Image (tube, helix red, strand yellow):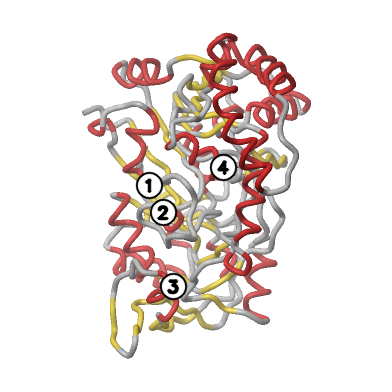
Amino acid sequence: MNNKTLVVCGIQWGDEGKGKMTDYLAQQADVVVRFQGGNNAGHTITFDGNKYALQSIPSGIFSPHIVNVMANGMVINPKAAIGELEKLEERGIRDYQLFISDRAAVIMPYHIELDGAYESLKGGKQIGTTKKGIGPAYTDKAARIGIRMGDLLDPEYFAERLRDALAQKNMELKMFGKQEMNFDELYKEYLGYGEKLRKHICDTSILLNKLIQEGKKVLFEGAQGVMLCIDNGTYPFVTSSSPTAASVPLGAGIAPRYIDNVLGICKAYTTRVGAGPFPTEIEGDLANYIRERGHEYGTVTGRPRRVGYLDCVALRHACRVSGVTNLSIMLFDVLSGMEKLKICVGYELDGKRIDYVPSCLSALERCKPVYEELPGWTEEITEIRDYDRLPAQAKAYIRRIEELTGVQVAVVSVGPDRTQTINRKEIF
């Protein structure tokens, strides 16, 4: 065991601040791996006074010495990935190492069209997808009619795969009253993307295993959060893959024994984008205060995020199913200026106290939060770098999170910049 691998894992409903922590920890890494999801989730990274929004490119892209891997568990929109790289290059980020798995699924234009069509069928019960084709691409992968990045490098085989896929997809598009897609146009366009990305596409499983065996420090990052996991999240209001650390071996093509540590990333409060149950949701002036201070708007969509108190029932669930070994509390500075704070310590379901997240959506929707109230603090904390200098009430809040989750808080973020970070423990 080399103790040199770390998974950065969101443990709420996504948007926890994984981008900042991945970027921060990437400074110590040799390799950064994105192991699942697609370009439906954004990472906002701020350093040297500049802000960058990444959607599918790994967060180590800013450092020339870091090997960046888009692994086989991802679904990749090649057009969007090329666009992301071009934008980075326009801003001077040209010297990088990027490797794309030949086994990663390709998001095709029909996936994007069908994503919107499937959502419209649900009427008032929409999942709230970003309509970027992620779900339909994962569906085709499971149904074995998907196209993979390596296929784009083999003209004859790609033609065969695309014809087979279009035979089915054009029937679906026609059923929704949408225009059918032209084989020749798609074939030519996507072969072109394959050629543009050819130098990056390889068997990333072989590469990663070699780097791990050489003792390199490897950081794994996912998209979304554990509560959006297709198996362990608030189904059906979830994403189409698993953002848990448990899915890293499968999504990266490595053995489970190579996962050493898992850093659970959570906000000091809770947010959620899109539909679905949210027991600790709050509205009104307090929600607006948190939303504005925390800039709680989607990186990709710009949608205002739903806001709530910290839910430690959901956190315990996420820590358990993802094997979290340490916590990183993000946007802690957002809570400054609040007189009182609440933490959800349990749920009440049909008059009975429970301490777990029900699997059935109807039961979770009936859950009422059981709160504990803690005193807030008025001091601004954005300039603090030493944990002991935090206000006593702030330290008490963190201590309570540790007691309720059974996991130590190793990192406290007090602002968006790389430097606005309090380290309590060396984790990587």
Quadrant hosting residue 404 = bottom left
Position of residue 329 relative to residue 428, above or below, is below
Q: Amino acid at mark 3?
A: Ala
Q: Which mark is residue 134?
A: 4
The N terminus, quarter of image: top left
Q: Mark 4 touching mark 2, by CB under 8 A?
A: no
Instruction: Read off the residue under disc 1.
Output: 244
Asked if the residue at tag 1 contacts the one at tag 3, i.e. Cβ–Cβ closer than 8 Å, the answer is: no
* Distance Cα–Cα, label 3 vs label 2: 30 Å
Instruction: Using the image, determine if residue 88 lies above or below residue 178.
Output: above
* Cβ atoms at labels 1 and 2 below 8 Å apart: yes
One can see residue 4 in this view: yes
Question: Where in the figure is residue 319, as x and y percent of width and height?
Answer: 32, 56
- Badge 4 local density, few (<14 within 10 Å), some, or many (20+)? many
Q: Residue 72, how many percent across, how many down?
A: 44, 28
Pointer 3: what residue?
392
Q: Residue at (59%, 56%) from the top-left corner?
A: 383
Disc 3 versus disc 4: distance between alpha carbons?
Answer: 44 Å
